[in-house]
Image: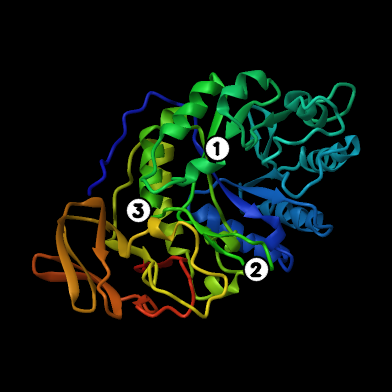
């Protein structure tokens, strides 16, 4: 499945790409840790971190570290606040103070992300907030919080992720746009589509639309902890399909937020496995996802410029689960994740080639060779019903151009637990 090398575009508006960072998972970060993450993200084309801030008393300290690290002279990287309203209180009038304090603290910071000359602010949820007002008027509540009269507060460009019917957007003049969190995944047993984006765009009536993109989703908490155990469908190269969709529709999508940099609990982390995990070590440790970052760099360049970049070195990106979806694990008391039937046992591959070649995917004695054109192509291989190691070989003119056998990418028909996380591997850059 090849991808076109150019995109028709009449838009001259710059595109921007952000990564969602859970500050709640950065308890042990230092400024140097932030600086390392910023350098890594910037090298892939990411423009800013959306700092998801909750109600932990130590989080303001880490937000300060993040802004300080972004302010190092060597970087033009930005930050902005994404208030996690599933964590922050918002039922009382006094609850606006925490939000306003954050905004005032960083409005004039050189690392603050602005949009249309205003301080960019987002949320996760917030549709149930009242800030002490009666009557349930969502627009009035958030006007009181972020755009109040007679209160000294910088001008805000408000692009929240409210989980509401997009048909209500015209009745919310407080918003300057909307972030569609759930546009990142298909929420059923089907492929991703642009229809949810189109609904938001239509109802925003030319306000700013921010789309989401994510490579995976699996969480495995029992009833004695967070009590969530399910998957979203990541099959059929979800990450690639979603990016290609956004590139194709880039004129209508000025902003993209990648979900996420470090949400280990839901398995859609793109950054290093660092910081403080939320009791997710059982399905995260040993499952590095940074290979997706390199692939994303290719897509980000196409999204921003309207032209897929030339490939200068043959590379292969591989990902997939290490265990059969239907395999029983009686010892795992959390149980089989909800929606497990939505995923198939495949290794998913993307090849970036400098010239046409044959690409062979194999796992043990099962293999498949495909003639592939130059540029980006998507491939897949069904796992056999036997233990095996994944391998990819690129041959051109009877010569091996790339032989990639990633260490640890071993499929096992007898899983030790219900781990539906993705194993990700990228050949060397």
Task: Find out whether the residues at labels 1 and 3 contact each other: C-beta distance under 8 Å.
Answer: no
Q: CA distance from mark 2 to mark 1?
A: 26 Å
Q: As rendered, which of 3 and 56 lies closer to the eye?
A: 56
Sequence-earlier tag: 1 or 3: 1
Picture quarter containing residue 162? Answer: top right
Taking the image as shown, residue 133 lies to the left or right of residue 357, namely right
Look at 62% across and 67% down and name the residue there: 222
Instruction: Please tell me whether residue 219 is drawn above or below residue 129 in the rendered image.
Output: below
The residue positioned farthest toward the front in the image shown: 330
Q: Earlier in the sequence, mark 2 or mark 3?
A: 3
Q: Quadrant of residue 384?
A: bottom left
Q: Could you tell me residue 10's position as x and y percent?
A: 38, 23
Which residue appears at 86% of the width and 21% of the height? 149
Residue 316 visible: no
Write down the residue under mark 3: 237
Q: Which mark is residue 180?
A: 1
Secondary-structure class at tag 3: loop
Residue that label 2 marks: 277
**Residue 34: where, in percent of width, then height?**
66, 61
Asked whether residue 279 is in view, the answer is yes
- Decide if residue 376 is on the left or right side of residue 198: left
In this orientation, which residue lies closer to the viewer: 179 or 126? 126
Q: Is residue 235 above or below residue 361?
A: above
Mark 1 vs mark 3, CA separation in Å: 20 Å
Q: Earlier in the sequence, mark 2 or mark 1?
A: 1
Marks 2 and 1 close (CB-CB < 8 Å): no
The kind of secondary structure element at disc 1 is: loop
Inter-mark Cα distance, 2 to 3: 26 Å
Residue ID at (82%, 60%) = 58
Position above or below: 363 against 301: below
Q: Label 3 neighbourhood size at 10 Å, few (<14), some (14-19), many (20+)?
A: many
């Amino acid at each position: 499945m090849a991808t076109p090398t150019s995109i028709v575009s009449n838009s001259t508006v710059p595109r921007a790409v952000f990564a969602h960072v859970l500050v709640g998972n950065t308890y042990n970060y230092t400024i140097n840790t932030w600086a390392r993450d910023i350098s890594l993200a910037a090298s892939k084309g990411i423009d800013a971190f959306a700092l998801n801030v909750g109600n932990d008393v130590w989080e303001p300290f880490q937000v300060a570290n993040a802004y300080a690290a972004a302010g190092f002279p060597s970087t033009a990287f930005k930050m902005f606040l994404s208030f996690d309203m599933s964590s922050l209180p918002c039922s009382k009038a006094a609850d606006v103070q925490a939000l306003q304090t954050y905004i005032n603290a960083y409005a004039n910071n050189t690392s603050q992300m602005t949009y249309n000359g205003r301080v960019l602010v987002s949320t996760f949820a917030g549709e149930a907030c009242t800030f002490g007002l009666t009557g349930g008027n969502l627009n009035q509540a958030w006007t009181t919080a972020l755009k109040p009269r007679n209160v000294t507060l910088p001008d805000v460009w408000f692009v929240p992720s409210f989980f509401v019917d997009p048909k209500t957007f015209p009745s919310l003049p407080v918003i300057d746009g909307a972030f569609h969190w759930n546009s990142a995944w298909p929420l059923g047993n089907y492929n991703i589509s642009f229809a949810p984006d189109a609904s938001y765009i239509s109802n925003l009536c030319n306000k700013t639309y921010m789309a989401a993109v994510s490579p995976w989703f699996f969480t495995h908490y029992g009833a004695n902890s967070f009590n969530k155990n399910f998957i979203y469908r990541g099959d059929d190269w979800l990450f690639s399909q979603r990016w290609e969709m956004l590139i194709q529709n880039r004129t209508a999508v000025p902003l993209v937020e990648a979900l996420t940099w470090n949400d280990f609990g839901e398995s859609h982390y793109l950054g290093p496995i660092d910081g403080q995990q939320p009791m997710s070590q059982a399905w995260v440790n040993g499952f590095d996802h940074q290979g997706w970052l390199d692939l994303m760099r290719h897509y980000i360049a196409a999204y921003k410029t309207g032209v897929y970049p030339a490939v200068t070195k043959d590379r292969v990106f591989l990902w997939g689960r290490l265990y059969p979806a239907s395999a029983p694990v009686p010892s795992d008391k959390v149980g089989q994740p909800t929606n497990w039937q939505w995923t198939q046992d495949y290794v998913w591959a993307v090849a970036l080639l400098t010239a046409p070649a044959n690409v062979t995917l194999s796992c043990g004695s099962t293999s498949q060779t495909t003639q592939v054109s130059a540029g980006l192509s998507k491939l897949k291989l069904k796992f056999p019903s036997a233990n095996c190691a994944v391998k990819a070989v690129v041959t051109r003119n009877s010569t091996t151009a790339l032989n990639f056998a990633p260490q640890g990418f071993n499929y096992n028909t007898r899983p030790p637990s219900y781990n539906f996380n993705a194993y990700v591997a990228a050949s060397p850059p």
